[in-house]
Image: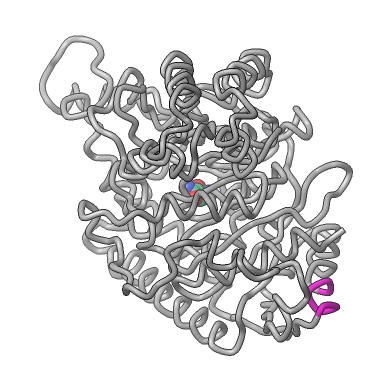
């Protein structure tokens, strides 16, 4: 499968037909056993591809950064005219009347939307097993999970069922499936990418981000996603001198040369490594030593508040979810079943039928954590821990350019292995959630494998230093192995 950079080049040169490429990918999707997609956008995609083939020589088209590049969209992101369900029964048949800002940006740059990908219901999970539409399978081993919640997006890239994909990451949902499927995924700094049109799970934590098979493609997609948006008041207004071209700002220097990372200071927080499986630990240390061999330095450090990250994350995420999901009541949004009775009965029936187990569990726990009498003990306390964790990251990133650690403590687990025990699933997020609490950017990229199952290296930088992440990741991708 070509990379996005190659697709754009081939199409602009007139070497490849976009329509043929789209047909090839749909053939693969239709034969696939993986269940990557909930809804396909086949006719519109073919039409868009024909348009690209006809007009690729026009000046306006030649400037498009993603001309003719097929992309899969996580089903938590609103797409005008295309069913958007968040993998929930309650949103089945919902067709948004508007596009998320990121979708507009993709279309402006010539990308071709293949369809909407499978995910954990309302982004709640780490395995894509809580989807109403059944689990997605890991392309490296069909008996295993692809990770979650953006599992459909990651599996689609790994299996050649798309070139690029969008995911959303509240506590690891881009990086976890990237790690389990052996691809690259980046969670941007909070406030970097517009959330307008993203169906909210926990809005103080989540960001839409790029997923791709190479670091270069990840950078290219990030550059498009970072479009400014007046409709998202949480999007940061970056200063004018901020880098706007993530691909080119670091491409002009030969970044594969050791000079690209010479003197780079890497921090390795012990808390992230302890508890990982031996093969994950080994691969991550090998990666750190590769950086060291070429002139980077590393130091081990302690970030003690990280021990409370999981508890704080789940309290905050569930509290926000309990409020965000109140709108799915069958009146404003969602499924309407049976005959209308009094308000309470109708509301309860619709929500009981429409939401899955995990979503209900979180609404109940979140409502509890926010209720009078418990608010101070749980929610407020979690916010205080969040502040401590944010400070700890800021402190660590003053004396280090990046932090390095495993994305996931283990490789992809078996389908059905953890889903019966929610706590064991929550524990899988131990290395990813603190990054969302702190709001810093982070990338996951492949750094080895164990018995054919990919292992992910997670790199973290300080706020708005996506450039540093991409540079380190690109260098590693080009030099490792
Ligand atoms: N697994 C985490 C959760 O269930 C993170 C999910 C996400 O990032 N959307 O909340």
Residue furthest to the left in view is: 342
Percent across and percent down for residue 413 are 73, 41
At a point 61% along the width and 36% down the height, the residue shown is 7
Judge by depth and name the residue closer to the eye, 272 or 348: 272
At a point 54% along the width and 88% down the height, the residue shown is 398
Can residue 421 be seen in the rendering of this structure?
no
Percent across and percent down for residue 106 are 41, 40
Is the N terminus in the top left, top right, bottom left or bottom right quadrant? top right
Q: Is residue 264 above or below residue 132?
A: below
At a point 36% along the width and 65% down the height, the residue shown is 378
- Residue 437 as seen in the image, left or right of residue 442: left
Q: Is residue 74 magenta?
A: no
At a point 58% along the width and 67% down the height, the residue shown is 250
Is the C terminus in the top left, top right, bottom left or bottom right quadrant? bottom right
Q: Is residue 300 above or below residue 180?
A: below
Judge by depth and name the residue closer to the eye, 416 or 72: 72
Percent across and percent down for residue 376 are 29, 70
- Residue 343 as seen in the image, left or right of residue 439: left
- Residue 180 as seen in the image, left or right of residue 453: left
Query: Could you tell me what secondary structure mostly forms the magenta stretch?
Result: helix
Q: State which region is magenta.
A: 289-294
Percent across and percent down for residue 421 are 60, 42
Residue furthest to the bottom in view is: 399
Q: How many marks?
A: 0
Residue furthest to the top in view is: 339
Can residue 448 be seen in the rendering of this structure?
yes
């Amino acid at each position: 499968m070509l990379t996005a950079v190659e697709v754009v080049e081939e199409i602009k040169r007139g070497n490849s037909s976009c329509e043929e490429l789209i047909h090839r990918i749909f053939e693969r999707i239709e034969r696939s056993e993986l269940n990557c997609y909930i809804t396909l956008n086949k006719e519109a995609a073919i039409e868009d591809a024909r348009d690209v083939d006809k007009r690729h020589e026009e000046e306006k088209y030649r400037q498009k950064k993603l001309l003719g590049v097929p992309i899969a969209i996580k089903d938590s992101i609103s797409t005008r005219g295309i069913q958007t369900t968040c993998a929930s029964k309650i949103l089945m048949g919902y067709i948004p009347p508007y596009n998320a800002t990121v979708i507009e940006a993709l279309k402006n740059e010539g990308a071709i939307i293949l369809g909407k990908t499978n995910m954990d219901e309302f982004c709640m999970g780490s395995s894509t097993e809580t989807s109403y539409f059944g689990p997605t399978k890991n392309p490296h081993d069909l008996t295993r999970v692809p990770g979650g919640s953006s599992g459909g997006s990651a599996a689609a890239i790994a299996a050649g069922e798309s070139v690029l994909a969008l995911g959303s990451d509240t506590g690891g949902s881009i990086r976890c499936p990237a790690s389990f499927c052996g691809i690259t995924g980046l969670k941007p700094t909070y406030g970097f990418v517009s959330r307008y049109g993203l169906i909210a799970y926990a809005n103080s934590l989540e960001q839409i981000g790029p997923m791709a098979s190479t670091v270069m493609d990840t950078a290219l997609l990030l550059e498009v996603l970072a479009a400014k948006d007046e409709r998202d008041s949480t999007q940061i207004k970056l200063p004018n001198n901020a880098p706007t071209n993530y691909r080119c700002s670091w491409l002009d220097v030969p970044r594969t040369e050791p000079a690209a990372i010479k003197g780079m200071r890497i921090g390795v927080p012990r808390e992230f490594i302890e508890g990982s499986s031996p093969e994950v630990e080994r691969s991550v240390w090998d990666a750190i030593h590769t950086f060291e061999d070429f002139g980077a330095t590393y130091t081990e450090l302690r970030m003690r508040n990280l021990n409370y990250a999981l508890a704080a994350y789940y309290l905050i995420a569930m509290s926000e979810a309990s409020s965000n999901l109140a709108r799915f009541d069958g009146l404003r949004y969602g499924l309407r079943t049976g005959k209308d009775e009094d308000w309470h009965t109708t509301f309860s029936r619709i929500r009981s039928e429409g939401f899955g187990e995990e979503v209900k569990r979180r609404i109940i726990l979140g409502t509890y954590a926010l209720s009078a009498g418990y608010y101070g003990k749980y929610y407020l306390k979690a916010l205080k821990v969040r502040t401590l964790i944010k400070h700890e990251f800021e402190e660590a990133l003053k004396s280090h350019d990046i932090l390095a650690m495993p994305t996931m403590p283990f490789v992809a687990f078996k389908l059905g292995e953890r889903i019966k025990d929610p706590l064991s699933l929550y524990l899988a997020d131990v290395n990813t959630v603190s990054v969302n609490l702190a709001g810093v950017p982070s990338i996951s990229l492949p750094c080895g494998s164990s018995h054919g199952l990919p292992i992910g290296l997670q790199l973290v930088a300080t706020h708005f230093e996506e450039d540093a992440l991409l540079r380190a990741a690109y260098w590693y991708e080009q030099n490792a192995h």
